Image (tube, helix red, strand yellow):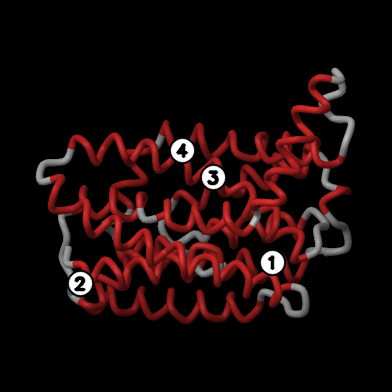
Amino acid sequence: MSLFQAVVLGIVQGLTEFVPVSSSAHLVLVPWLLGWRFDPQAAFVFDVLVQLGTLVAVILYFWNDLVTLARSVVRDAFRREPLASPESRLAWQIVLATVPAAVAGVLFKKVVAQAFDSPLLTSLCLLGTAALLLAAERFGRPTSNLTGLRFLDALWIGLAQVISLLPGVSRSGSTISAGILRGLQRREAARFSFLMSIPVMLGAGLIAGIDLVRLPGLPAILPPIVVGSLAAALTGYLAIRWLLAFLARRPLTVFAAYCAFVGLGGVLLALLRG
């Protein structure tokens, strides 16, 4: 992988990680459409580790929120009232929502890695993302904020995150949709989705880091990962800021239409190419 390719894929990752159009789908389909061929194992490690750039972006954007959550957890723990404040409850709800995807990621790691080598499956899953977004807009009643979030709601959103392990199912799309279906306002659902992405991306990055050390030719793949992560961090920060402002005023239908268009195009092209 050249540095130019790494920058392009890093920008793709940063723009699509938080916007509900599936970063994993674009990291599969963009090289496929451009005719870029990479070692499958190295490409999978790159795709996971470049998320560390978007992890940096979400931490920087929500830094004040994260500090507030951490302080509340520690304060309420010392008071022996771990759920006393809304901030502490939100922190533990984020932990709960993380558990399903963490368990599934460990159990089905090999299956997920193999799925990243299938443009057809990726395109079909992208159509699934479109369906999720449309379902949220059709059946959701987005009226409450995060102070009204229950632990059952958090678990529901966490279960929705499990299906996003498949390439083409947007993590932000599935979790935002689940939040809206549980009554969260669009912007609040996106905020919870972004906060709960932090432990997931950190865990995935640590596991991929172990795989990276075991890969032959580590010095060759390390510079593209660093460059791609930097590009993802910058574009990811801008994408978060833009999407939160967008969802304060507009629905998810435009992203559903985009996913349906790209997914359908990918299916047709995959069938034509055989």
* Vertical arrangement, residue 55 with respect to residue 203, above or below: below
Residue 102 as seen in the image, left or right of residue 41: right
Which numbered marker is on residue 203?
A: 4
Q: List the residue tagged with mark 2.
A: 274
How many C-alpha atoms fall within 10 Å of the one at disc 4: few (<14), some, or many (≥20)?
A: some
Which numbered marker is on residue 162?
A: 3
Residue 35 at x, y percent in the picture: 18, 75
Which amino acid type is marked by label 1? Ala
Task: Judge depth for marks 4 and 2 and give the one in front.
Answer: 4
Which amino acid type is marked by label 2? Gly
Q: Could you tell me how far apart the alpha carbons at marks 1 and 4 are, in whole angstroms?
A: 30 Å
Which amino acid type is marked by label 4? Gly
Task: Judge depth for marks 3 and 4 and give the one in front.
Answer: 4
Q: Could you tell me how far apart the alpha carbons at marks 3 and 1 are, in whole angstroms?
A: 18 Å
**Element type at marker 3?**
helix
How many C-alpha atoms fall within 10 Å of the one at disc 1: few (<14), some, or many (≥20)?
A: some
Tell me which numbered mark, 3 or 1, is placed earlier along the sequence. Answer: 1
Q: List the residue tagged with mark 1.
A: 135
Residue at screen point 73% across, 58% down: 189
Residue 50 at x, y percent in the picture: 36, 55
Task: Judge depth for marks 1 and 2 and give the one in front.
Answer: 1
Residue 33 as seen in the image, left or right of residue 241: left
Q: Could you tell me how far apart the alpha carbons at marks 3 and 4 are, in whole angstroms?
A: 14 Å
**Element type at marker 2?**
loop
Q: Could you tell me how far apart the alpha carbons at marks 1 and 2 are, in whole angstroms?
A: 32 Å
Residue at screen point 49% across, 53% down: 56
